[in-house]
Image (cartoon, rainbow, N blue to C red):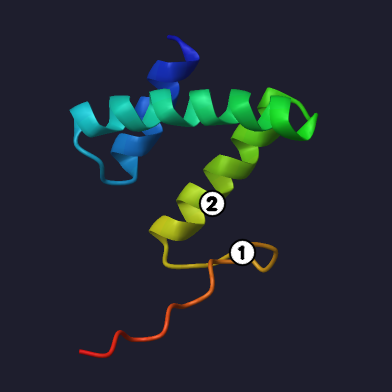
C-alpha cells in the first residue's frame, strides 16, 4: 500500500467520501513537499504537521500555535 493510499484511508476514516479522500491525500503530499522546500524541514515533519491540523480541525480544535487569519469586519450594506 502506498503512502497516498494510507493517507486516503485516513481521510476516509475522518469522514471524507472515497473520491474526496484520494484528492485530499494527494494534496496533503504535495503541500508537505512544498512546505519542506519553503521552510527547509523534512517532508515527513511537514506531513505530520498537516495531519495534526487536519485531525484537530476535524475535531473542531485549533492548535495553540496555529494562528488563524484575522477576522474581517462585517461589510456595510
Tag 2: Cα neighbours inside 10 Å, few (<14), some, or many (≥20)?
A: some
User: Which residue is drawn at the image coordinates 75% and 25% (left, top)?
Assistant: 42
Kind of element beneath mark 1? loop
Q: Which residue matches tag 1?
A: 63
Mark 1 vs 2: CB contact within 8 A: yes
Farthest right residue?
A: 40
Q: Which labelled disc corresponds to residue 53?
A: 2
Picture layout, residue 52 above or below residue 76:
above
Q: Where is residue 38, by image quadrant?
A: top right
Tag 1: Cα neighbours inside 10 Å, few (<14), some, or many (≥20)?
A: few
Q: Where is residue 11, by image quadrant?
A: top left
Along the horizontal axis of the image, is 63 left or right of 29? right
The mark tally for this picture is 2
Location of residue 65 in the rendering, given as x and y in whole percent from the top left corner: 70, 63
Location of residue 51 in the rendering, given as x and y in whole percent from the top left corner: 54, 42
Along the horizontal axis of the image, is 69 left or right of 48? left
Name the residue nearer the viewer: 43 or 1. 43
Location of residue 46 in the rendering, given as x and y in whole percent from the top left corner: 66, 34
User: Which residue is drawn at the image coordinates 25% and 41% (left, top)?
Assistant: 16
User: Which residue is drawn at the image coordinates 53% and 74% (left, top)?
Assistant: 70
Amino acid at each position: 500500500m502506498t503512502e497516498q493510499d494510507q493517507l486516503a484511508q485516513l481521510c476516509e476514516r475522518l469522514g471524507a467520501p472515497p473520491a474526496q479522500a484520494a484528492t485530499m491525500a494527494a494534496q496533503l503530499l504535495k503541500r508537505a513537499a512544498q512546505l519542506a522546500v519553503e521552510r527547509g524541514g523534512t517532508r515527513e515533519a511537514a506531513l505530520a504537521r498537516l495531519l495534526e491540523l487536519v485531525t484537530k480541525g476535524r475535531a473542531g480544535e485549533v492548535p495553540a500555535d496555529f494562528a488563524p487569519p484575522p477576522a474581517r469586519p462585517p461589510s456595510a450594506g
